Amino acid sequence: MSLTCCCVFSANCSGCGPGYRSPLDAMKGPREQIVYLPCIYRNTDILKPDYLATVDVDASSSTYCQVMVEPVDLFWKCDLANPHTSHCLANGQIMISCLGDPSGNGKGGFILLDGETFEVAGNWEHPGEAAPFGYDFWYQPRHNVMISTEWGAPRALADGFNPADVMEGFYGSRLHIWDWTSHRKLQTLDLGKDGAVPLEVRFLHDPNATEGYVGCALSSNVFRFYRTPEREWAAEKVISVPSKKVEGWMLPEMPGLITDILISLDDRFLYFSNWLHGDIRQYDITDRRKPQLVGQVFLGGSLVSDGPVRVLEDPENQPQPHPCIIQGRRVYGGPQMLQLSLDGQRLYLTTSLFSSWDKQFYPEMVRHGSVMLQIDVNSISGGLSLNNNFLVDFGEEPDGPALAHELRYPGGDCTSDIWV
């Protein structure tokens, strides 16, 4: 039975979503009709609170691709700040990972909320046992394990990316393995330079599986993590996106910057976004140790052919992509957060990463707002193509251009459902 993260979307978390028996049963579920996503005004010139947007994705609806809006203004008090990932727990509580403490220092702790009142119940981890940095997490009760990742200290992130902060230790490179029952940290895997800034972590959906993948942003590598015969945990690099030598950019080499990954419910395909290079990639992971690239589509990014950056050397020998223009609207920014339909045939994306980084790398997106797009997916042999009939333009919001972020379905999805 699956646990769905309905807490973000309903009055309480006491009632989970459809509760499909298995990932394959979920793939046979009804088509998505609405999508929820937070929209950000923080660190922009618009002095309005962040809000939760409801987007109609039912193609037969009269309000298809339109936003409805529910303002929210959340504050957390648990000696933690910058909440990120939320999951519903079997006991009805909500668990949220955090990036740091209220002073902006790195602190990878977790908040527990009451699933009905949303009141803070306390910390999930034991006192003094928070990780140095925090970001995402995924738990698998059947194996009594949770794995969390690291981004960086919020005070280093707040003003944009400074390469010197990496050398000074303000960014992470580790996976933390936790005992799900005792809440104790068991093991830390340092992925080193090849694993710089591990962000989104995904177990395979099969609850019997003891492996999964994590996307490392700055190094632009994907690592497979797995449990060894000795019941320890280990990780190996299985996908690498090479940096491109460029001119007209802040550094002589531009990484892809893998910012989001997800796995289809049948554990057949892995998808990830390269926010700087501007592409989404689809890999067949039937062979878990040797993923095969089977689909790719470019949607903006920093390498567009009419932009200021020129590629001098590209190990993949790809031409600079044309700008992405849909329904007369140019897409600023690059593909960032992803969400896949339950049947694996539609991939949704937004283009905002973090408001201060958006300002630094894509100032035009801050001025014009981000967008939500839909990609048609070949879920049989692989392949990605842009659906030119779907566009949600957050530049047209009543209070001004907004920066839309994470995508979630109200009844559970590929990035929140956990089978026990």
Image: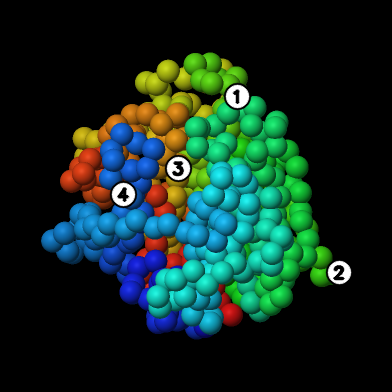
Which is nearer the N-term, disc 2 or disc 3? Answer: 2
| Residue drawn 61% across the image and 69% down it | 124
Residue 96 seen anywhere in this rendered image of the structure: yes
Q: Label 1, secondary structure: give it.
A: strand
- The first of marks 4 and 2 along the sequence is 4
> On residue 294, which mark appears?
none
Q: Which mark is residue 230?
A: 2
Q: Residue at x 24, y 57 (%)?
A: 69
Residue drawn 26% across the image and 60% down it: 70
Give the distance between the C-alpha atoms of the residues marked 1 and 2, in whole angstroms: 40 Å
**Mark 2 or mark 1, which is nearer the start of the sequence?**
2
Report the residue marked by disc 4: 49
- Sequence-first disc among 3 and 1: 1
Q: Position of residue 356 (x, y in %)?
A: 45, 35
Relative placement, left or right, of 268 versus 176 is left
Residues at discs 1 and 2 in contact (Cβ within 8 Å):
no
Q: For the residue labelled by badge 4, is the local secondary structure a helix, a strand or a loop?
A: loop
For badge 3, the amino acid type reads Leu
According to the picture, the residue beneath numbered tag 3 turns out to be: 353
Q: Amino acid at mark 4?
A: Pro
Residue at which label 1 appears: 253
Mark 2: which amino acid? Answer: Glu
Of the residues tagged 1 and 4, which is closer to the observer? 4
Q: Residues within 10 Å of mark 2 (few under 14, many from 20)?
A: few
Q: Report the amino acid beneath label 1.
A: Glu
State the residue at coordinates (60%, 73%).
Answer: 206
Please state the total of marks drawn on the protein image. 4
- The CA span between labels 4 and 2 is 49 Å
CB under 8 Å between callouts 4 and 3?
no
